[in-house]
């Protein structure tokens, strides 16, 4: 709640500032069709020095929201997030992308042999010294063809390495839960930043306290739902991502 409040305050302050007209723009990479799924790219370009946010934005900011409801021949759209950066500004840590990002889109169709008319409304937060919310619109006709490769293929490859073996201890606290996650993950040359998500965006999750027991990384967080009471947590939905030196390792589900 405090982080969102900071973003709203900053965004309100930004309205009184001179903001470039081309802070952010979006377009589509038409991509290609494979095995009944259309692979396309949402390319968000930012003005130099500006940044936008990952799905878990850190201490401040808002995650992107995607609305594809105006599309035709689209059953579902899965957005892939490339590995983000950890950014610190004035003691505030955020997680996201500088200057732009290409989000791969995995589009399930109703008719795999027919074209797709994709229409999207994307809500993002963008920041430089000031922060503003923005709504971007994209549309395009995606045909059952296309050439594989280019920036879209590079972005698809920029994904976390998947690891297993995460164990969790969950304890009730006055206004929610405390979760301690442990996973075998040797140290790296850079700092390792952990992010824990619940699968429910309404549950507030604190910045993890990270420690080590040899090759075991330990991350401790508090989770507070809107009711501010202990709640039932689906262990299979717990996701931990560890970011370090431009790479990421992801664990899904507590054993």
Image (cartoon, grey):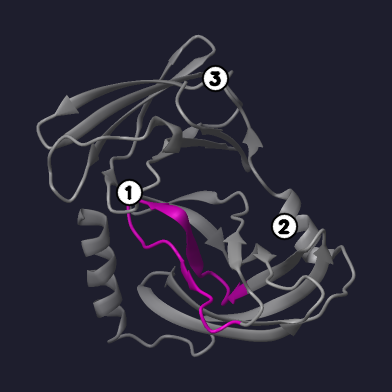
On the image, numbered disc 2 is attached to which residue? 155
- Between the residue at mark 2 and the residue at mark 1, the CA separation in whole angstroms equals 30 Å
Percent position (x, y) of residue 2? 20, 55
Count of residue discs:
3
The residue mark sitting in front, 2 or 1, is 2
Instruction: Using residue 205 as the reference point, say whether residue 25 is left or right of it.
Output: right
Q: Quick one: 54 or 12, which is closer to the camera?
A: 54
Percent position (x, y) of residue 105? 66, 64
Judging from the image, what secondary structure is the residue with disc 3 in?
A: loop
Question: Residue most toward the top?
Answer: 214
Query: Circles 1 and 3: CB distance less than 8 Å?
Result: no
On the image, numbered disc 1 is attached to which residue? 91
- Between the residue at mark 1 and the residue at mark 3, the CA separation in whole angstroms equals 33 Å
Judging from the image, what secondary structure is the residue with disc 2 in?
A: helix
Residue drawn at (18%, 36%) of the image: 176
In magenta segment, residue 154: no
In the figure, residue 60 lies in which quadrant?
bottom left
Percent position (x, y) of residue 236? 45, 33
Sequence order check, earlier mark of 2 and 1? 1
Question: Residue most toward the front?
Answer: 111
Instruction: Using residue 151 as the reference point, say whether residue 241 is left or right of it.
Output: left
Percent position (x, y) of residue 155? 72, 57
In magenta segment, residue 57: yes
Q: Which residues are magenta?
A: 44-71
Residue drawn at (66%, 35%) of the image: 161
Residue drawn at (82%, 74%) of the image: 113
Whether residue 194 is visible to the viewer of this picture, yes or no, is no
Numbered label attached to residue 165: 3
Instruction: Using residue 57 as the reference point, say whether residue 137 is left or right of it.
Output: right
The vertical placement of 176 against 57, above or below, is above
Question: Residue most toward the left?
Answer: 174
């Amino acid at each position: 709640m405090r982080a969102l409040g900071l973003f709203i305050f900053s965004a309100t302050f930004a309205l009184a500032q001179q903001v470039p007209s081309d802070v952010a723009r979006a377009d589509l990479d038409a991509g290609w069709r494979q095995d009944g799924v259309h692979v396309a790219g949402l390319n968000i370009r930012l003005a130099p020095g500006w940044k936008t946010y990952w799905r878990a934005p850190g201490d401040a900011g808002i995650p992107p929201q995607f609305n594809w409801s105006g599309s035709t021949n689209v059953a579902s759209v899965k957005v892939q997030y490339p590995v983000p950066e950890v950014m610190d500004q004035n003691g505030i840590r955020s997680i996201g992308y500088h200057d732009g990002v290409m989000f791969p889109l995995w589009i399930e169709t109703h008719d795999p042999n027919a074209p797709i008319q994709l229409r999207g409304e994307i809500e993002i937060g963008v920041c430089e010294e000031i922060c503003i919310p923005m709504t971007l619109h994209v549309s395009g006709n995606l045909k059952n063809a296309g050439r594989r490769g280019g920036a879209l293929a590079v972005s698809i490859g920029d994904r976390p390495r998947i690891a297993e073996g995460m164990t969790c201890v969950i304890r009730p606290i006055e206004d929610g839960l405390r979760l301690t996650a442990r996973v075998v993950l040797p140290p790296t040359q850079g700092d390792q930043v952990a992010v824990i998500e619940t699968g429910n965006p309404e549950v507030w999750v604190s910045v993890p306290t990270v420690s080590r027991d040899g090759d075991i990384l330990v991350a401790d967080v508090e989770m507070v739902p809107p009711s501010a009471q202990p709640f039932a947590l689906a262990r299979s939905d717990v996701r931990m991502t560890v970011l370090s030196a431009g790479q990421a390792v992801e664990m899904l589900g507590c054993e």
